[in-house]
Amino acid sequence: MRTDQGRRPPRARLARWLLRRTGFRLVGDMPARGLLVGAPHTSNWDLALAILVFWAHDVTPRVLVKSEVFWWPLGAVLRRLGAIPTDRSGGSGLVARLIEAAHQDERFVVALAPDGTRRAADHWKSGFYRLALATGMPVTCAFVDGPTRTVGTGPTFTMTGDVVADMHAIRAFFADKRGLRPGRGSAVRLRAEDAAGPTG
């Protein structure tokens, strides 16, 4: 990541200027590789802010997109933007393709929104956790907090397979993050934790 303002590429300077102009403070660093988990997802504006955060760090993340939309010519455009087709019926070899792509790219970041919805839900979707375990890629927390007008990234964790302990650490970080529309964020909890018992 470039730390000298004068040496940042044009889109990074533009993104940082737009964030300042809209009253947002950018914090944290972008990982060189791994899974980026963004929350809380409470507004349609989350995507625009996420793009500005990525651009501010001169990062083009990979995004998982359902394979049905990869028709010509949209498919070629999506791939150029970093989209990775996923087969929701399963058996598509997604993990193997992610591992191969990660080996080919020194700056490989996959962005995921485990909320899965802009409305409050009882659980996060567990895809990011399963991918982290299968690929060995670390998980970095990314957030937007409306009350403090802050966006950016927080700590990076390596998932251990102890879902309760792993999610407890992630939950602690997101505990005070409210999103652009406070009260609409989903509970930072996986269904696998329910079977494992209370977190305390």
Image (tube, rainbow, N blue to C red):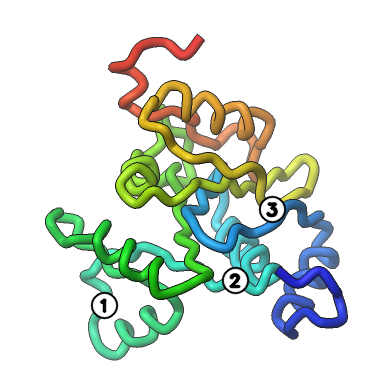
Give x and y (percent) for residue 161.
36, 31
- Residue drawn at 58 percent across, 44 percent down: 156
Q: Which residue is drawn at 44% across and 67% down?
A: 62
Q: How crowded is mark 1: few (under 14 residues within 10 Å), some or many (20 or more)?
A: some
* Horizontal side of residue 31 vs 119, given as left or right: right
Q: Nearer the viewer, residue 173 or 34?
A: 34
Which residue is label 1 attached to?
70
Q: Residue at x 54, y 73 (%)?
A: 60
Image quadrant where residue 73 sits? bottom left
The residue that label 3 is drawn on is 152
Crowding at mark 3 (Cα within 10 Å: few <14, some 14-19, many 20+): many
Q: In this view, does 197 lie above or below 112?
A: above
Element at label 3: strand
Distance from label 1 to label 2 (Cα)? 23 Å
Q: Which is more toward the observer, 65 or 159?
A: 159
Tell me where residue 30 appears, x and y as whole percent. 64, 59
Percent across and percent down for residue 132 are 38, 46
The amino acid on which the numbered mark 1 sits, given as a three-letter code, is Phe
Nearest to the observer: residue 108 or residue 51: 108
Q: Which residue corresponds to mark 2?
A: 59
Nearer mark to the viewer, of 1 and 3: 3
Whichever of callouts 1 and 2 sits on the residue coming sooner in the sequence is 2
Q: In which quarter of the image is residue 127?
A: top left
